[in-house]
Amino acid sequence: MNMKSLNSRATRTGAALILAAAIWPAQGAVQKNIGLTPIGRYASGIYNASATETVAHDPTTQWLYVVNSTNRVIDVLSIADPTQPAKLGSINLAQVPPTKYGIPRGLAVRDGIVAISFQATPKTDPGVVAFVVAALDANLPPGQQIVVPDMRQVTVGALPDMLTFTPNGRFVLVANEGEPNTYNNVGANTNGPSIDPEGSVSIINLSGGVAALTQADVRTAVFTHFNDHITQLRAAGVRIYGPNATVAQDLEPEYIAVAHDSRTAWVTLQENNAVATLDIVAGTFTEILPLGFKDHSLANNGFGSSNALDASDQDGTNQIVNWPVKGMYQPDNIAAYKYRGDDYIVMANEGDARSVLGLLPPPASGSEDIRVGAVDYVLNPDIYPAAVATFLKRSTNLGRLQASRISGDLDGDGKREEIHTFGGRSFSIRKASGELVFDSGDQFEQITAAMFPANFNANSSNNTRDTRSDDSGPEPECLVLGKAFGRQFAFIGLERVSGIMVYDVTNPHEARFVNYVNNRNFSVTPSAANIPPKPAPNTGDLSPEALIFIKEEDSPNGKPLLVVTHEVSGTTTVFEITREQ
Protein backbone atom coordinates (compact mmCIF):
# COMPACT_ATOMS: atom_id res chain seq x y z
CA MET A 1 0.00 0.00 0.00
CA ASN A 2 1.45 3.37 -0.96
CA MET A 3 1.17 6.86 0.46
CA LYS A 4 -1.12 8.07 -2.30
CA SER A 5 -3.78 5.45 -1.63
CA LEU A 6 -3.64 6.08 2.12
CA ASN A 7 -4.03 9.83 1.67
CA SER A 8 -6.89 9.40 -0.79
CA ARG A 9 -8.71 7.22 1.73
CA ALA A 10 -8.28 9.81 4.45
CA THR A 11 -9.84 12.52 2.26
CA ARG A 12 -12.92 10.42 1.68
CA THR A 13 -14.00 10.56 5.35
CA GLY A 14 -16.56 13.32 4.91
CA ALA A 15 -18.15 11.56 1.97
CA ALA A 16 -18.30 8.33 3.95
CA LEU A 17 -20.24 10.01 6.76
CA ILE A 18 -22.66 11.63 4.33
CA LEU A 19 -23.22 8.24 2.77
CA ALA A 20 -23.77 6.69 6.19
CA ALA A 21 -26.37 9.31 7.06
CA ALA A 22 -28.17 8.60 3.82
CA ILE A 23 -28.17 4.86 4.34
CA TRP A 24 -28.89 4.85 8.06
CA PRO A 25 -30.95 7.86 9.12
CA ALA A 26 -32.10 8.21 12.74
CA GLN A 27 -33.41 4.97 14.21
CA GLY A 28 -32.54 3.09 11.03
CA ALA A 29 -35.71 3.94 9.12
CA VAL A 30 -34.43 2.26 5.98
CA GLN A 31 -35.63 -1.37 5.95
CA LYS A 32 -36.68 -1.14 9.62
CA ASN A 33 -39.42 -3.63 10.41
CA ILE A 34 -39.25 -3.96 14.19
CA GLY A 35 -38.99 -1.36 16.90
CA LEU A 36 -37.58 -1.50 20.43
CA THR A 37 -39.48 0.57 22.95
CA PRO A 38 -38.29 0.76 26.59
CA ILE A 39 -41.39 0.09 28.68
CA GLY A 40 -39.96 -0.76 32.12
CA ARG A 41 -36.74 -0.18 34.02
CA TYR A 42 -35.26 -1.24 37.34
CA ALA A 43 -32.45 0.86 38.79
CA SER A 44 -30.32 -0.83 41.41
CA GLY A 45 -28.96 2.51 42.64
CA ILE A 46 -25.43 1.10 42.41
CA TYR A 47 -23.41 2.82 39.72
CA ASN A 48 -20.33 1.48 37.91
CA ALA A 49 -19.91 -1.43 40.30
CA SER A 50 -21.30 -4.49 38.47
CA ALA A 51 -24.67 -4.52 40.23
CA THR A 52 -26.57 -5.70 37.13
CA GLU A 53 -24.68 -8.26 35.09
CA THR A 54 -26.05 -11.57 33.86
CA VAL A 55 -29.83 -11.95 33.74
CA ALA A 56 -32.18 -14.93 33.33
CA HIS A 57 -35.97 -15.19 33.00
CA ASP A 58 -38.35 -17.78 34.44
CA PRO A 59 -41.66 -17.67 32.53
CA THR A 60 -43.43 -19.83 35.14
CA THR A 61 -43.15 -17.03 37.72
CA GLN A 62 -42.36 -14.04 35.45
CA TRP A 63 -39.28 -13.41 37.55
CA LEU A 64 -35.97 -12.02 36.40
CA TYR A 65 -32.82 -13.16 38.18
CA VAL A 66 -30.05 -10.55 38.00
CA VAL A 67 -26.48 -11.08 39.20
CA ASN A 68 -25.48 -8.33 41.65
CA SER A 69 -21.75 -8.90 42.10
CA THR A 70 -21.37 -5.87 44.35
CA ASN A 71 -23.65 -7.25 47.05
CA ARG A 72 -22.89 -10.91 46.21
CA VAL A 73 -26.57 -11.67 45.72
CA ILE A 74 -28.99 -12.53 42.95
CA ASP A 75 -31.68 -9.86 42.82
CA VAL A 76 -35.10 -11.23 41.94
CA LEU A 77 -37.39 -8.91 39.99
CA SER A 78 -41.02 -9.50 39.10
CA ILE A 79 -42.04 -8.47 35.60
CA ALA A 80 -45.64 -9.64 35.95
CA ASP A 81 -46.22 -6.03 34.95
CA PRO A 82 -43.28 -5.46 32.57
CA THR A 83 -43.78 -1.69 32.77
CA GLN A 84 -43.04 -1.79 36.50
CA PRO A 85 -40.24 -4.25 37.31
CA ALA A 86 -40.38 -4.75 41.08
CA LYS A 87 -37.69 -6.17 43.31
CA LEU A 88 -39.09 -9.05 45.37
CA GLY A 89 -35.88 -9.77 47.25
CA SER A 90 -32.49 -11.35 46.78
CA ILE A 91 -30.88 -14.77 46.94
CA ASN A 92 -28.14 -14.47 49.55
CA LEU A 93 -25.11 -16.21 48.10
CA ALA A 94 -23.26 -16.19 51.40
CA GLN A 95 -24.97 -19.55 51.85
CA VAL A 96 -22.60 -21.13 49.33
CA PRO A 97 -20.00 -23.08 51.31
CA PRO A 98 -17.12 -22.95 51.80
CA THR A 99 -16.22 -19.28 52.14
CA LYS A 100 -13.41 -19.59 49.57
CA TYR A 101 -15.93 -19.03 46.77
CA GLY A 102 -16.16 -15.41 45.73
CA ILE A 103 -18.44 -13.39 43.51
CA PRO A 104 -21.09 -15.01 41.30
CA ARG A 105 -20.21 -15.02 37.61
CA GLY A 106 -22.70 -16.96 35.47
CA LEU A 107 -26.44 -17.49 35.80
CA ALA A 108 -29.11 -19.57 34.07
CA VAL A 109 -32.64 -20.67 34.99
CA ARG A 110 -35.07 -23.36 33.83
CA ASP A 111 -38.33 -24.53 35.39
CA GLY A 112 -37.61 -22.64 38.61
CA ILE A 113 -34.11 -24.11 39.00
CA VAL A 114 -31.42 -21.42 39.16
CA ALA A 115 -27.83 -22.38 38.31
CA ILE A 116 -25.06 -20.01 39.46
CA SER A 117 -21.31 -20.30 38.87
CA PHE A 118 -18.69 -19.10 41.37
CA GLN A 119 -14.99 -18.67 40.98
CA ALA A 120 -12.75 -19.82 43.78
CA THR A 121 -10.19 -17.85 45.77
CA PRO A 122 -7.61 -18.18 44.33
CA LYS A 123 -9.16 -18.19 40.87
CA THR A 124 -6.87 -21.00 39.72
CA ASP A 125 -8.64 -23.49 42.04
CA PRO A 126 -11.74 -25.40 40.85
CA GLY A 127 -14.94 -23.39 41.09
CA VAL A 128 -18.47 -24.49 41.88
CA VAL A 129 -21.96 -24.36 40.42
CA ALA A 130 -24.78 -23.98 42.92
CA PHE A 131 -28.40 -24.92 42.19
CA VAL A 132 -31.18 -23.16 44.06
CA VAL A 133 -34.95 -22.98 43.94
CA ALA A 134 -36.18 -19.63 45.21
CA ALA A 135 -39.55 -19.16 46.87
CA LEU A 136 -41.70 -16.16 47.76
CA ASP A 137 -42.64 -15.52 51.40
CA ALA A 138 -45.34 -12.85 51.35
CA ASN A 139 -45.11 -12.50 55.14
CA LEU A 140 -41.72 -10.81 54.82
CA PRO A 141 -41.36 -7.06 54.11
CA PRO A 142 -41.57 -5.93 50.47
CA GLY A 143 -38.23 -6.24 48.74
CA GLN A 144 -37.13 -8.98 51.15
CA GLN A 145 -39.58 -11.73 50.26
CA ILE A 146 -37.28 -14.21 48.52
CA VAL A 147 -36.19 -17.25 50.50
CA VAL A 148 -34.06 -20.23 49.47
CA PRO A 149 -35.09 -23.41 51.26
CA ASP A 150 -32.39 -25.56 49.69
CA MET A 151 -29.11 -25.27 47.78
CA ARG A 152 -26.98 -27.95 46.17
CA GLN A 153 -23.57 -27.54 44.56
CA VAL A 154 -20.99 -29.40 42.52
CA THR A 155 -17.35 -28.69 41.72
CA VAL A 156 -16.38 -27.70 38.17
CA GLY A 157 -13.25 -26.35 36.46
CA ALA A 158 -11.18 -23.29 37.27
CA LEU A 159 -12.77 -19.86 36.84
CA PRO A 160 -16.26 -20.95 35.77
CA ASP A 161 -18.21 -18.14 34.17
CA MET A 162 -20.97 -18.41 31.59
CA LEU A 163 -23.30 -21.38 31.94
CA THR A 164 -26.43 -22.51 30.11
CA PHE A 165 -29.10 -25.20 30.16
CA THR A 166 -29.32 -27.31 27.03
CA PRO A 167 -32.65 -26.89 25.18
CA ASN A 168 -33.85 -30.31 26.39
CA GLY A 169 -33.08 -29.34 30.00
CA ARG A 170 -30.96 -32.42 30.59
CA PHE A 171 -27.58 -30.72 30.99
CA VAL A 172 -26.02 -27.54 32.27
CA LEU A 173 -22.84 -26.58 30.41
CA VAL A 174 -20.26 -24.40 32.16
CA ALA A 175 -17.42 -22.48 30.48
CA ASN A 176 -14.33 -22.78 32.72
CA GLU A 177 -11.87 -20.14 31.54
CA GLY A 178 -8.87 -21.44 33.43
CA GLU A 179 -6.91 -18.17 33.36
CA PRO A 180 -3.35 -18.28 34.77
CA ASN A 181 -2.42 -16.20 37.80
CA THR A 182 1.02 -15.43 36.31
CA TYR A 183 3.55 -16.81 33.87
CA ASN A 184 6.47 -15.97 36.18
CA ASN A 185 7.35 -19.17 37.96
CA VAL A 186 9.01 -17.59 40.98
CA GLY A 187 7.69 -17.81 44.50
CA ALA A 188 8.62 -14.23 45.37
CA ASN A 189 6.28 -12.97 42.65
CA THR A 190 3.33 -10.98 43.99
CA ASN A 191 0.96 -13.44 42.33
CA GLY A 192 2.77 -16.48 43.74
CA PRO A 193 4.18 -19.37 41.69
CA SER A 194 2.84 -19.73 38.17
CA ILE A 195 -0.39 -21.73 37.98
CA ASP A 196 -2.07 -22.11 34.59
CA PRO A 197 -5.20 -24.29 34.86
CA GLU A 198 -6.59 -26.02 31.81
CA GLY A 199 -9.56 -24.40 30.13
CA SER A 200 -12.57 -26.71 29.94
CA VAL A 201 -16.34 -27.10 29.79
CA SER A 202 -18.12 -28.96 32.58
CA ILE A 203 -21.23 -30.94 31.65
CA ILE A 204 -23.63 -31.36 34.56
CA ASN A 205 -26.24 -34.10 34.07
CA LEU A 206 -29.58 -33.11 35.61
CA SER A 207 -31.60 -36.05 34.31
CA GLY A 208 -31.94 -37.42 37.85
CA GLY A 209 -33.15 -34.09 39.21
CA VAL A 210 -31.36 -31.48 41.31
CA ALA A 211 -32.31 -33.14 44.60
CA ALA A 212 -30.33 -36.25 43.62
CA LEU A 213 -27.40 -34.36 42.10
CA THR A 214 -23.92 -35.57 43.08
CA GLN A 215 -20.38 -34.96 41.89
CA ALA A 216 -20.67 -38.15 39.84
CA ASP A 217 -23.09 -36.28 37.57
CA VAL A 218 -20.33 -33.93 36.41
CA ARG A 219 -18.07 -34.62 33.43
CA THR A 220 -15.48 -32.13 32.25
CA ALA A 221 -14.45 -31.84 28.61
CA VAL A 222 -10.80 -30.81 28.25
CA PHE A 223 -8.40 -30.09 25.39
CA THR A 224 -5.53 -32.38 26.38
CA HIS A 225 -5.96 -34.55 23.28
CA PHE A 226 -4.95 -31.50 21.21
CA ASN A 227 -1.66 -30.97 23.08
CA ASP A 228 0.37 -32.90 20.53
CA HIS A 229 -1.11 -30.80 17.71
CA ILE A 230 0.09 -27.41 18.90
CA THR A 231 2.22 -26.79 15.80
CA GLN A 232 -0.66 -27.56 13.41
CA LEU A 233 -3.10 -25.45 15.38
CA ARG A 234 -0.78 -22.45 15.39
CA ALA A 235 -0.16 -22.84 11.67
CA ALA A 236 -3.93 -22.88 11.12
CA GLY A 237 -4.29 -19.60 12.98
CA VAL A 238 -5.26 -20.59 16.54
CA ARG A 239 -3.51 -18.18 18.90
CA ILE A 240 -1.64 -20.34 21.43
CA TYR A 241 0.92 -18.10 23.02
CA GLY A 242 1.12 -18.41 26.80
CA PRO A 243 4.77 -19.03 27.77
CA ASN A 244 5.33 -22.79 28.15
CA ALA A 245 1.57 -23.39 28.04
CA THR A 246 0.12 -26.53 26.52
CA VAL A 247 -2.86 -26.26 24.19
CA ALA A 248 -5.16 -27.31 27.04
CA GLN A 249 -3.74 -24.64 29.33
CA ASP A 250 -3.80 -21.84 26.78
CA LEU A 251 -7.36 -22.26 25.49
CA GLU A 252 -9.82 -20.23 27.58
CA PRO A 253 -13.54 -20.96 27.00
CA GLU A 254 -15.61 -17.77 27.14
CA TYR A 255 -19.19 -18.42 26.01
CA ILE A 256 -21.33 -21.36 24.88
CA ALA A 257 -24.06 -21.81 22.26
CA VAL A 258 -26.01 -25.07 22.09
CA ALA A 259 -27.62 -26.64 19.03
CA HIS A 260 -31.38 -27.10 19.09
CA ASP A 261 -31.00 -30.90 19.39
CA SER A 262 -28.86 -30.52 22.56
CA ARG A 263 -26.15 -32.73 21.11
CA THR A 264 -23.58 -30.16 19.96
CA ALA A 265 -22.24 -26.92 21.43
CA TRP A 266 -19.90 -24.23 20.15
CA VAL A 267 -17.56 -22.51 22.58
CA THR A 268 -15.78 -19.21 21.95
CA LEU A 269 -12.07 -19.13 22.79
CA GLN A 270 -11.78 -15.35 22.76
CA GLU A 271 -8.10 -14.69 23.38
CA ASN A 272 -7.25 -17.57 21.06
CA ASN A 273 -9.41 -16.17 18.20
CA ALA A 274 -11.07 -19.53 17.74
CA VAL A 275 -14.22 -21.57 18.39
CA ALA A 276 -14.31 -25.14 19.72
CA THR A 277 -16.96 -27.71 18.82
CA LEU A 278 -18.19 -29.88 21.69
CA ASP A 279 -19.92 -33.25 21.40
CA ILE A 280 -22.14 -33.00 24.48
CA VAL A 281 -23.16 -36.66 24.55
CA ALA A 282 -19.58 -37.92 24.29
CA GLY A 283 -18.24 -35.10 26.48
CA THR A 284 -15.42 -34.43 24.01
CA PHE A 285 -14.17 -31.48 21.99
CA THR A 286 -14.06 -32.56 18.36
CA GLU A 287 -12.70 -29.47 16.57
CA ILE A 288 -10.93 -26.18 17.14
CA LEU A 289 -11.85 -23.72 14.41
CA PRO A 290 -9.55 -20.72 13.81
CA LEU A 291 -11.50 -17.57 12.92
CA GLY A 292 -8.83 -15.77 10.93
CA PHE A 293 -8.55 -12.03 10.39
CA LYS A 294 -10.79 -9.23 9.25
CA ASP A 295 -9.02 -7.23 6.56
CA HIS A 296 -9.72 -3.57 7.33
CA SER A 297 -8.17 -2.49 4.02
CA LEU A 298 -11.17 -3.87 2.10
CA ALA A 299 -13.52 -1.19 0.79
CA ASN A 300 -15.95 -3.99 -0.12
CA ASN A 301 -16.02 -6.95 2.24
CA GLY A 302 -18.42 -8.98 0.08
CA PHE A 303 -21.27 -8.69 2.59
CA GLY A 304 -22.64 -5.29 1.64
CA SER A 305 -20.28 -2.97 3.49
CA SER A 306 -16.70 -1.82 3.88
CA ASN A 307 -14.29 -3.09 6.53
CA ALA A 308 -13.24 0.48 7.37
CA LEU A 309 -12.64 1.65 10.95
CA ASP A 310 -11.85 4.78 12.92
CA ALA A 311 -8.41 3.97 14.32
CA SER A 312 -7.52 7.15 16.22
CA ASP A 313 -8.86 9.01 19.24
CA GLN A 314 -6.89 12.08 18.17
CA ASP A 315 -7.96 12.61 14.56
CA GLY A 316 -10.46 15.31 15.50
CA THR A 317 -13.28 13.88 13.36
CA ASN A 318 -15.14 10.64 12.78
CA GLN A 319 -12.71 9.18 10.24
CA ILE A 320 -14.04 5.77 9.32
CA VAL A 321 -11.66 4.77 6.54
CA ASN A 322 -9.78 1.73 5.30
CA TRP A 323 -6.37 1.03 6.80
CA PRO A 324 -3.77 -1.73 6.31
CA VAL A 325 -4.83 -3.44 9.53
CA LYS A 326 -6.10 -6.94 10.28
CA GLY A 327 -8.56 -7.40 13.09
CA MET A 328 -8.72 -10.57 15.16
CA TYR A 329 -12.43 -11.38 15.51
CA GLN A 330 -12.09 -12.64 19.10
CA PRO A 331 -15.81 -13.08 19.80
CA ASP A 332 -17.30 -12.96 23.27
CA ASN A 333 -20.97 -14.01 23.06
CA ILE A 334 -22.12 -16.68 20.63
CA ALA A 335 -25.56 -18.00 19.66
CA ALA A 336 -26.75 -20.72 17.28
CA TYR A 337 -29.75 -21.37 15.05
CA LYS A 338 -30.80 -23.45 12.06
CA TYR A 339 -31.51 -22.32 8.53
CA ARG A 340 -32.77 -24.83 5.99
CA GLY A 341 -31.50 -27.70 8.10
CA ASP A 342 -27.97 -26.36 8.64
CA ASP A 343 -26.46 -24.97 11.84
CA TYR A 344 -25.18 -21.39 11.92
CA ILE A 345 -23.34 -19.61 14.71
CA VAL A 346 -23.59 -15.89 15.40
CA MET A 347 -20.83 -14.03 17.24
CA ALA A 348 -20.24 -10.59 18.77
CA ASN A 349 -16.66 -9.71 17.84
CA GLU A 350 -15.61 -7.82 20.97
CA GLY A 351 -11.84 -8.42 21.04
CA ASP A 352 -9.65 -8.88 24.09
CA ALA A 353 -5.96 -8.47 24.86
CA ARG A 354 -4.37 -10.89 27.29
CA SER A 355 -2.69 -9.26 30.27
CA VAL A 356 -0.88 -11.67 32.57
CA LEU A 357 2.35 -11.00 34.44
CA GLY A 358 5.21 -12.74 32.64
CA LEU A 359 3.41 -13.00 29.30
CA LEU A 360 6.24 -10.99 27.75
CA PRO A 361 9.64 -9.85 28.98
CA PRO A 362 10.00 -6.29 30.35
CA PRO A 363 9.09 -3.57 29.59
CA ALA A 364 5.82 -5.13 28.40
CA SER A 365 5.03 -6.29 31.97
CA GLY A 366 2.53 -8.87 30.79
CA SER A 367 0.37 -6.61 28.61
CA GLU A 368 -0.21 -7.92 25.10
CA ASP A 369 -1.44 -4.60 23.73
CA ILE A 370 0.81 -1.85 22.38
CA ARG A 371 0.16 1.27 20.33
CA VAL A 372 1.21 1.16 16.68
CA GLY A 373 3.07 4.44 17.22
CA ALA A 374 5.25 3.03 20.00
CA VAL A 375 9.00 3.09 19.35
CA ASP A 376 9.31 -0.63 20.02
CA TYR A 377 6.48 -1.49 17.61
CA VAL A 378 8.64 -1.87 14.52
CA LEU A 379 7.13 -2.18 11.06
CA ASN A 380 9.03 -4.23 8.50
CA PRO A 381 10.55 -1.72 6.05
CA ASP A 382 10.20 -4.21 3.20
CA ILE A 383 6.42 -3.98 3.62
CA TYR A 384 6.17 -0.46 5.02
CA PRO A 385 8.87 1.86 3.57
CA ALA A 386 10.05 4.63 5.87
CA ALA A 387 7.65 7.27 4.51
CA VAL A 388 4.67 4.92 4.82
CA ALA A 389 5.67 3.80 8.33
CA THR A 390 6.02 7.43 9.43
CA PHE A 391 2.60 8.23 7.99
CA LEU A 392 0.94 5.24 9.66
CA LYS A 393 2.53 5.96 13.03
CA ARG A 394 1.09 9.47 13.24
CA SER A 395 -1.32 9.78 16.16
CA THR A 396 -4.04 10.99 13.79
CA ASN A 397 -3.67 7.85 11.66
CA LEU A 398 -2.71 4.47 13.22
CA GLY A 399 -0.29 5.64 15.88
CA ARG A 400 -2.86 5.45 18.68
CA LEU A 401 -4.38 2.12 17.63
CA GLN A 402 -3.97 -0.74 20.12
CA ALA A 403 -2.27 -3.67 18.43
CA SER A 404 -0.87 -7.02 19.53
CA ARG A 405 2.76 -7.34 20.60
CA ILE A 406 2.57 -11.07 19.93
CA SER A 407 1.09 -11.50 16.47
CA GLY A 408 1.91 -9.76 13.20
CA ASP A 409 5.60 -10.67 13.21
CA LEU A 410 5.24 -13.43 10.65
CA ASP A 411 8.89 -14.43 10.34
CA GLY A 412 10.01 -13.93 13.96
CA ASP A 413 12.54 -11.20 13.27
CA GLY A 414 10.94 -8.67 15.65
CA LYS A 415 9.42 -6.59 12.83
CA ARG A 416 5.75 -6.59 11.94
CA GLU A 417 4.73 -7.64 8.48
CA GLU A 418 1.07 -7.18 9.49
CA ILE A 419 -0.70 -4.96 12.03
CA HIS A 420 -3.05 -7.06 14.16
CA THR A 421 -5.66 -5.34 16.31
CA PHE A 422 -8.24 -6.68 18.77
CA GLY A 423 -11.83 -7.46 17.78
CA GLY A 424 -13.83 -6.98 14.60
CA ARG A 425 -16.06 -4.06 15.70
CA SER A 426 -18.86 -6.14 14.18
CA PHE A 427 -20.93 -9.26 14.45
CA SER A 428 -20.49 -12.30 12.24
CA ILE A 429 -22.44 -15.31 11.09
CA ARG A 430 -20.62 -18.52 10.25
CA LYS A 431 -21.50 -22.02 9.24
CA ALA A 432 -20.86 -24.65 11.89
CA SER A 433 -17.72 -25.49 9.93
CA GLY A 434 -16.39 -21.98 10.63
CA GLU A 435 -16.94 -20.58 7.13
CA LEU A 436 -17.82 -16.88 7.27
CA VAL A 437 -21.14 -16.12 5.55
CA PHE A 438 -21.75 -12.58 6.89
CA ASP A 439 -19.92 -9.83 8.72
CA SER A 440 -21.39 -6.41 9.47
CA GLY A 441 -18.12 -4.74 8.46
CA ASP A 442 -17.99 -1.09 9.50
CA GLN A 443 -21.76 -0.73 9.88
CA PHE A 444 -21.72 -0.34 13.67
CA GLU A 445 -19.36 2.61 13.45
CA GLN A 446 -21.09 4.14 10.42
CA ILE A 447 -24.52 3.89 12.07
CA THR A 448 -23.45 5.27 15.44
CA ALA A 449 -21.48 8.07 13.75
CA ALA A 450 -24.53 9.07 11.72
CA MET A 451 -26.89 8.99 14.70
CA PHE A 452 -24.60 10.40 17.41
CA PRO A 453 -21.84 12.33 15.62
CA ALA A 454 -20.91 14.35 18.72
CA ASN A 455 -20.58 11.18 20.85
CA PHE A 456 -19.29 8.71 18.30
CA ASN A 457 -17.17 5.96 19.92
CA ALA A 458 -17.63 7.52 23.35
CA ASN A 459 -16.71 5.39 26.34
CA SER A 460 -19.16 4.30 29.01
CA SER A 461 -17.23 6.51 31.45
CA ASN A 462 -17.46 9.72 29.38
CA ASN A 463 -19.34 11.32 26.51
CA THR A 464 -16.22 12.36 24.62
CA ARG A 465 -16.22 11.64 20.91
CA ASP A 466 -13.58 9.21 19.64
CA THR A 467 -12.49 7.98 23.09
CA ARG A 468 -12.66 4.34 22.04
CA SER A 469 -11.66 4.68 18.38
CA ASP A 470 -8.14 3.51 19.17
CA ASP A 471 -9.39 0.54 21.17
CA SER A 472 -12.17 -1.71 19.75
CA GLY A 473 -14.54 1.15 18.90
CA PRO A 474 -18.13 0.48 19.99
CA GLU A 475 -17.04 -2.94 21.32
CA PRO A 476 -19.88 -5.38 20.59
CA GLU A 477 -19.99 -7.76 23.54
CA CYS A 478 -23.35 -9.40 24.13
CA LEU A 479 -25.93 -10.82 21.75
CA VAL A 480 -29.07 -12.89 21.72
CA LEU A 481 -31.24 -14.38 18.97
CA GLY A 482 -35.01 -14.18 18.96
CA LYS A 483 -37.83 -15.00 16.59
CA ALA A 484 -40.63 -12.46 16.26
CA PHE A 485 -43.31 -11.90 13.63
CA GLY A 486 -42.03 -14.86 11.65
CA ARG A 487 -38.48 -13.50 11.34
CA GLN A 488 -35.22 -14.36 13.11
CA PHE A 489 -33.43 -11.39 14.66
CA ALA A 490 -30.03 -10.84 16.25
CA PHE A 491 -29.80 -8.25 19.04
CA ILE A 492 -26.24 -7.04 19.72
CA GLY A 493 -25.22 -4.86 22.68
CA LEU A 494 -22.46 -2.26 22.25
CA GLU A 495 -20.56 -2.12 25.51
CA ARG A 496 -18.94 1.32 25.17
CA VAL A 497 -21.15 3.77 23.30
CA SER A 498 -24.09 1.64 24.51
CA GLY A 499 -27.30 0.74 22.72
CA ILE A 500 -28.67 -2.28 20.89
CA MET A 501 -28.16 -3.12 17.22
CA VAL A 502 -30.88 -5.21 15.58
CA TYR A 503 -30.35 -7.30 12.45
CA ASP A 504 -32.68 -9.58 10.54
CA VAL A 505 -30.71 -12.82 10.20
CA THR A 506 -33.55 -15.05 8.98
CA ASN A 507 -31.40 -15.92 5.98
CA PRO A 508 -27.83 -15.88 7.33
CA HIS A 509 -26.47 -15.19 3.85
CA GLU A 510 -28.62 -12.07 3.52
CA ALA A 511 -28.49 -10.57 7.02
CA ARG A 512 -29.50 -6.90 7.14
CA PHE A 513 -29.55 -4.05 9.63
CA VAL A 514 -33.04 -3.02 10.78
CA ASN A 515 -32.67 -0.83 13.88
CA TYR A 516 -30.43 0.74 16.49
CA VAL A 517 -31.76 1.98 19.82
CA ASN A 518 -29.65 3.75 22.43
CA ASN A 519 -31.33 4.56 25.74
CA ARG A 520 -28.32 6.53 27.00
CA ASN A 521 -28.64 10.14 28.19
CA PHE A 522 -25.75 11.98 26.56
CA SER A 523 -26.73 15.24 28.27
CA VAL A 524 -25.37 13.87 31.56
CA THR A 525 -21.67 13.23 32.00
CA PRO A 526 -21.00 9.78 33.47
CA SER A 527 -18.44 9.27 36.19
CA ALA A 528 -15.58 6.83 35.88
CA ALA A 529 -15.54 6.23 39.63
CA ASN A 530 -17.71 4.05 41.84
CA ILE A 531 -19.98 6.50 43.62
CA PRO A 532 -22.25 4.57 46.07
CA PRO A 533 -23.84 5.45 48.39
CA LYS A 534 -24.38 8.71 46.50
CA PRO A 535 -27.29 8.68 44.03
CA ALA A 536 -26.35 7.31 40.64
CA PRO A 537 -26.22 9.96 37.91
CA ASN A 538 -29.13 10.05 35.47
CA THR A 539 -27.07 8.75 32.57
CA GLY A 540 -29.75 6.45 31.19
CA ASP A 541 -28.62 2.95 30.28
CA LEU A 542 -24.84 2.57 30.12
CA SER A 543 -22.84 -0.43 28.95
CA PRO A 544 -25.12 -3.38 28.08
CA GLU A 545 -23.73 -6.53 29.65
CA ALA A 546 -26.35 -9.22 28.97
CA LEU A 547 -29.43 -9.67 26.80
CA ILE A 548 -32.32 -12.11 26.97
CA PHE A 549 -35.16 -12.51 24.49
CA ILE A 550 -38.61 -13.42 25.80
CA LYS A 551 -40.86 -14.89 23.14
CA GLU A 552 -44.56 -14.06 22.98
CA GLU A 553 -45.80 -17.27 24.60
CA ASP A 554 -43.46 -16.74 27.57
CA SER A 555 -44.06 -13.01 27.90
CA PRO A 556 -46.12 -11.46 30.73
CA ASN A 557 -47.96 -9.18 28.29
CA GLY A 558 -48.14 -11.58 25.35
CA LYS A 559 -45.66 -9.56 23.30
CA PRO A 560 -42.02 -10.33 22.53
CA LEU A 561 -39.64 -8.59 24.92
CA LEU A 562 -35.93 -7.89 25.15
CA VAL A 563 -34.38 -7.53 28.62
CA VAL A 564 -31.01 -5.79 28.90
CA THR A 565 -28.78 -5.42 31.95
CA HIS A 566 -26.31 -2.53 32.04
CA GLU A 567 -23.14 -2.98 34.05
CA VAL A 568 -22.18 0.69 34.47
CA SER A 569 -25.58 2.34 35.03
CA GLY A 570 -26.73 -0.56 37.23
CA THR A 571 -30.04 -0.78 35.39
CA THR A 572 -32.21 -3.55 33.96
CA THR A 573 -34.45 -2.39 31.13
CA VAL A 574 -37.40 -4.14 29.49
CA PHE A 575 -37.94 -3.35 25.80
CA GLU A 576 -41.11 -4.25 23.96
CA ILE A 577 -40.52 -5.46 20.42
CA THR A 578 -43.04 -4.09 17.94
CA ARG A 579 -43.70 -4.64 14.27
CA GLU A 580 -43.07 -1.56 12.15
CA GLN A 581 -43.24 -0.81 8.45
Image (cartoon, rainbow, N blue to C red):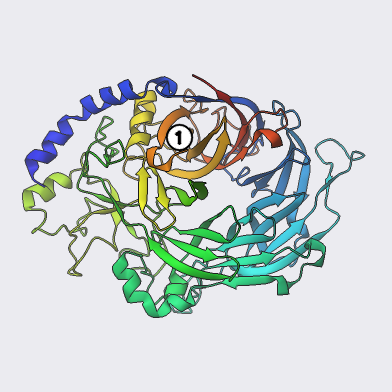
Name the spot of residue 297 as percent of width and height, x first: 21, 44
Could you tell me which residue is drawn at 20 percent across and 56 percent down?
Answer: 418
In percent of the image, x 77 and y 67: which residue is there?
213
Q: Give the image location of residue 358, x and y in percent.
A: 39, 70
Q: Can residue 362 be seen from the camera position used here?
A: no
Left or right position of 413 against 438: left
Front position in the image: 238 or 17:
238
The residue nearer to you, when weighing 395 against 572, is: 572
29 horizontally vs 418: left or right:
right
Relative to 441, say whether 256 is above or below: below
Circle 1 — which element? strand
Q: What is the three-letter code of the residue carrying label 1?
A: Tyr
Can you identify the residue that label 1 sits on? 503
The residue that appears at 74% across and 58% down in the rendered structure is 131
Indicate the position of residue 181 as horizontal and vertical percent values. 49, 69
| Closer-to-camera residue (251/68) | 251
| Relative vertical location of residue 8 with respect to residue 213 in this rendering, above or below | above
Give the left or right position of residue 342, taking residue 103 as reference. Answer: left
Residue 424 in the image, given as x and y percentages of width and height: 35, 47
Q: Is any part of residue 531 visible from this angle?
A: yes
| Vertical side of 337 occupied by 417: above or below | below
